[in-house]
Image: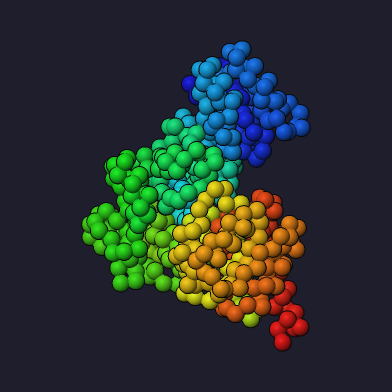
Amino acid sequence: MEHILGTGTVLVTGAGVSGTGTHALLTSLGADVVLVDDRSQLPGVIATESARELLRGGSVSLLVTSPGWRPDSEIFAEAERAGVEVIGDVELAYRLDRAEVFGTPRAWLVVTGTNGKTTTTAMLADIMALHCAASGQHAQAVGNIGTAVADALRAEERVDVLVAELSSFQLHWSSELRPDAGVLLNLAEDHLDWHGSLAAYAADKASVLTAGRPVAGIDDALVRAEVERLNPANLVGFTVAEPEPGQVGVVDGRITDRIDGEPVDICSAEGLQPAGPAGVLDALAAAAVARTQGVAPDTIATALANFSVAGHRGAVVHRGSKQWIDNSKATNPHAADAALGAFDDRVIWIAGGQLKGAEVDDLLRTHAHRLSAVGLLGQDRGVLAAAVEKHAPGIPVLVTDETEPEKAMTELVDFAHRQDGVTVLLAPAAASLDMYTGMGQRGDLFTAAAARIDADPEENR
């Protein structure tokens, strides 16, 4: 392992879940590891300035960063001056796996994109689990869904196929990662405060196309631009249109594989979960990756037929006087666009939070005709309210200034219940951390409030 870790101290930045997991992994391998985090009170964790002193002293051989640390952090500049390589936790796990530290290397299937990552990863993991079961192997969702990659490598029951959901942060710090297959679903403005520009963000995401079998969502203009820039070999495209050779698409309402030219029928595109065009795209992506790995069409069809939506990703959470849908995972305008696009009209939209500099005019321009009312909360509610007024003037709008999480959501749910419409959709188009502990809490409070209001006979007279 010396060629991976070096002979000196390994610094690990961040004492959160990722950092402590990396620390435990390296400690189990006998490495000299030091955790770095200015905010942590854990024993043995040092501050950034102390870590910079270690770097200047020449005793550090590798720096492993947690994904949340921005690339312009001064500690990374210090590492560069000291000639110390900086990699991410996923890159570390990949290098250790390829070096056979944990036995025969695993198959790595990586999923990334601005939206749809979690659903596609879960679909693909279900497909691969069914495929692997026939040969006594084990596939598992890892990364930002399911198990941490490092934990999967050390699992008591060997994981043979890692289906990894990876963020742009993780890919930024993964210079040698070359998965067996990698899919880039889509691209839109997101995390620009971290990456500095859309071009830098797109480049980090598109690095997944260096995979042995790259797969790309060719209906997306930004993805097509990255494909043209990189010109990856053996590319497989997926599309909601009829596929050309080298693609997976839809023919007469059925998902069809034309990777090798001749059409291979997989399954119906109707009745999939989650419902709507976004769900079909997720299924196309998962099917395309699975086919590159030799998975039979009937295995894919069975797994997709039995697939159910994870929480906060477009599930119908309540049916009463209206249909209530929790898509709290729609944390940017691109995801909200997909969520709104699944409905024809009479949608009561609940949105708001931290836009992180993203523009929302196009979102409202596209979906104004679908909206019957809008409820807004959170830090950037005013930006959204202005866009609603511009593109959907005259519809009922409630903008709450309430900052207590449950009260704010209850106020908007009460408002939505009183409006004319058939579907209440929580698709915030914004991050949640201005008010909530995460998108999960936001969705849970929406679900609970919806259930209460329709259970109240006084409200349903």
- Whole-percent x and y of residue 38? 70, 30
Q: Residue at x 51, y 48 (%)?
A: 190
Colour scheme of this structure image?
A: rainbow
Above-or-below relation of 125 to 182: below
Q: Is residue 292 left or right of residue 417?
A: left
The residue drawn where x is 45% and y is 72% is 271
Closer-to-camera residue (282/30): 282
Indicate the quadrant where residue 217 lies: bottom left
Is residue 114 visible in this depiction of the protein?
Answer: yes
In percent of width and height, residue 364 lies at 50, 63
Q: Is residue 278 above or below residue 451?
A: above
Considering depth in this image, is 449 or 6 the residue closer to the camera?
Answer: 449
Which residue is situated farthest in the top direction here?
Answer: 57
- Is residue 16 shown left or right of residue 223? right
Left or right of 151? Residue 222 is: left
Measuring from the top left, give residue 194's x and y in whole percent.
54, 39
Q: Quadrant of the C terminus?
A: bottom right
- Residue 258 lies in what quarter of the image? bottom left
Give x and y (percent) for residue 353: 63, 55
Of residue 320 and residue 403, the one placed in the foreground of this image is 403
- Classify residue 414 by image quadrant: bottom right
**Can the viewer see residue 94 in this picture?**
no
